Image (spheres, rainbow, N blue to C red):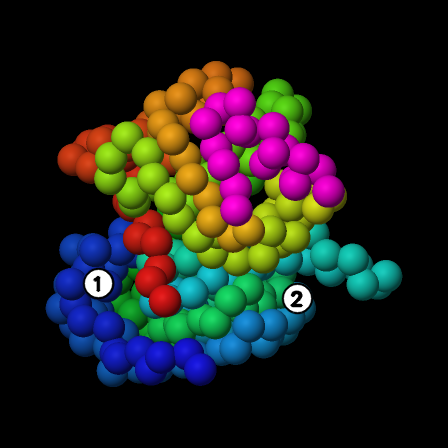
Amino acid sequence: MFKSTPTPDDAFLRGLSFFAGLPEPDMAAFRAAMAVKNYAKGQNLFHQGDKADRLFVILRGWCKLYRGTAEGEEAIVAVFTRGDVFGEAAIFDNADYPVSAEAAEELSLIEIPAKTLKARARENIDITTRLMASMSREMHKLQIENEHKILMDAPQRVGCLLLQLSSDMIGTGGTFLFPYDKSLAAQRLGMKSETFSRALAQLKAAGVTVHGPEITIDSFDRLIDYSCGHCSAVQNECRGSCRATDCKNCAQTVKFPTT
C-alpha cells in the first residue's frame, strides 16, 4: 500500500518555480482549493481529449504522459516525478488535455481545480506567465530529446537518462534503484526493450553495472564524458550533466523519491 501523504507545507510549494514568490493571497487560494490524491500504479488520471479541469503537482512517485493511437500504441511524451507540474492546459477556457496521464508507479499528487487557477490568473497575470514558461520548458526538453535521437547512439541516450535519474546523488559515483519499469524507459527513449537492455550492457565500458533494478555508476564524470558530448544542452538546461550541489546555474534539482 502507498503510504499516506500529508498536505504539503509552504517550503515544498515555494521551492517550485511555479509557486516561488507568489503573493500570499494567491498561495492562500491555492492551499484552500488543492486536494492531495493517491493513485495506484497503472491508474489513469485523465485521458487525451478530456476536459482540462485540474493542474497537477507531483508529491511522490512517477507519472507518464502519453498519446495513444487507434491501434492501442502509445507514444511517451514525458515521465514526471516529485516537484514536476503538468496539466497546464487547465489555465485555458474550454481546453482539453492534449495527452493522457497514468501513474507509472504509486503516485501522490496535488490537484488544483481549473476554476481556482483561472480566478487567480485574472487577479495576477504572472500566474499565466508562469504556466506558459512551464510549457515552454517542456517543449524545449522535447526538442533536446529529438536532438538526442539524431545525434546520440542508444548507449549514450541511456547514459543520459541514468545521469538524470541520479541527479540528486552526492559524490563521485553511486548506486540507486531504477525507479520505474525499464520497458517504460525504453518507450520514453523511442527504442525497443531489447535495444534498451543491450545499451545498458554496453554502458559497462563507461563504468555502469546493472543487477536487476540496481544501477551502479562508478564515476559520474566518466559517464558524462561518454554521454554528453553530442548534446547541445548547457548546465542550466540539464541537471544530469552537473553534479555540483551548490551550482546556482543548474535547473531545480528533482529529489529522488523515497519508498
Q: Nearer the viewer, residue 91 or 14?
A: 14
Q: Position of residue 4 (x, y in %)?
A: 33, 82
Which one is nearer the viewer's eye here, 75 or 23? Answer: 75
- For disc 2, the neighbor class at 10 Å (few under 14, some 14 to 19, many from 20) is some
Q: Quadrant of residue 192?
A: top right
Q: Secondary structure at mark 2?
A: loop
Which residue is found at the position 40% from the left and 73% from the top? 108
Percent across and percent down for residue 249 are 24, 31
26 on left or right of 134: left
- Please state the horizontal and vertical placement of residue 162, each as a whole percent of the image: 47, 39
Q: Amino acid at mark 2?
A: Gln
**Which of disc 1 and disc 2 is earlier in sequence?**
1
- Read off the residue under disc 1: 12
Q: Which secondary structure, mark 1?
A: helix
Image quarter hosting the N terminus: bottom left
Label ID, residue 227: none
| 125, 145: nearer the viewer | 145
Determine the residue located farthest toward the right in the rendered image. 71
Q: Relative to 174, is 213 on the left or the right? A: right
Q: Main secondary structure of the magenta part?
A: helix
Residue at the (73%, 42%) spot, across then down: 194
Magenta residues (range): 194-211
Reading the image, the residue beneath label 2 is 48
- In the rendered structure, the answer to whether residue 166 lies left or right of residue 146 reads left
Q: Is residue 136 above or below residue 97?
A: above
From mark 2 to mark 1, how far is it between C-alphas? Answer: 29 Å
The C terminus, quarter of image: bottom left
